[in-house]
Image (cartoon, rainbow, N blue to C red):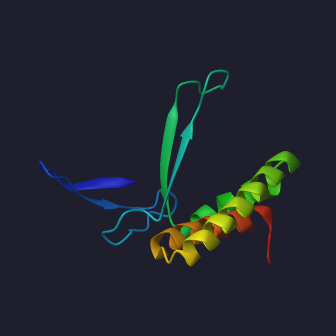
Amino acid sequence: MKKILEPRIEEYAEYYSDFSGESFGGFHPDVQIKFEFNYGSEFDGSRAEFHLTDGEAKSLLDFIRMNLSEGKTKELNKKLEENEEYYDENMNARDWQSCDHFGNCIGLLKYLTNDNK
C-alpha cells in the first residue's frame, strides 16, 4: 500500500506491506505481485496489485509450489537448466551483474521446483 505523505510535483511516498501494514523503511516494496483477470474470469478486466515483504511472498510461493502441475514443473526445470547455463556463461565472462540476476532467478526456480541440489 502506498501512502502519499506530501503531494508534490515529484511524489514523496512511503510504501507499506498490504498484508501486515509494515513499512518498507523509505524503500520500494520487496515484492510486488500483480493479478490480471482475463476474458472468462469472474473478474474479467480487473487488476489487483499488492506490495509484500519477502516472508509474506514466500507463503504465496509455497501455495503455488504445492499446486503446480507436472507439466509446469517440467517447464520450470527446463528454465532452471537454461538459467544455470546463462549463469555459467556470465561467470566466465565476469559479468557480475548478470550473474547476480541469474543467480536470483535460479534460486526462485529451485524453490518452486523443490530442487535442493
In the rendering, at what x and y percent does residue 29 appear?
42, 62
The residue sitting at 30% across, 54% down in the picture is 3
For residue 37, what is the image quadrant? top right
Q: Position of residue 55 (x, y in %)?
A: 59, 70
The quarter holding residue 36 reads top right
Closest to the observer: 4 or 108?
Answer: 108
| Farthest right residue in view | 70
Name the one closer to the observer, 19 or 117. 117
Does residue 102 appear in the picture of this structure?
Answer: yes
Coordinates of residue 34 in the picture (x, y in percent): 52, 45
61 w.r.t. 23: above or below: above
Residue at left 50%, top 40%? 48
Q: Tell me: 77 left or right of 106.
A: right
Please name whichever residue, 115 or 48, is drawn nearer the observer in this view of the structure: 115
Residue visible at 52% across and 67% down?
Answer: 101
* Residue farthest to the left, as pictured: 9
- Residue 99's place in the image compared with 17, above or below, is below
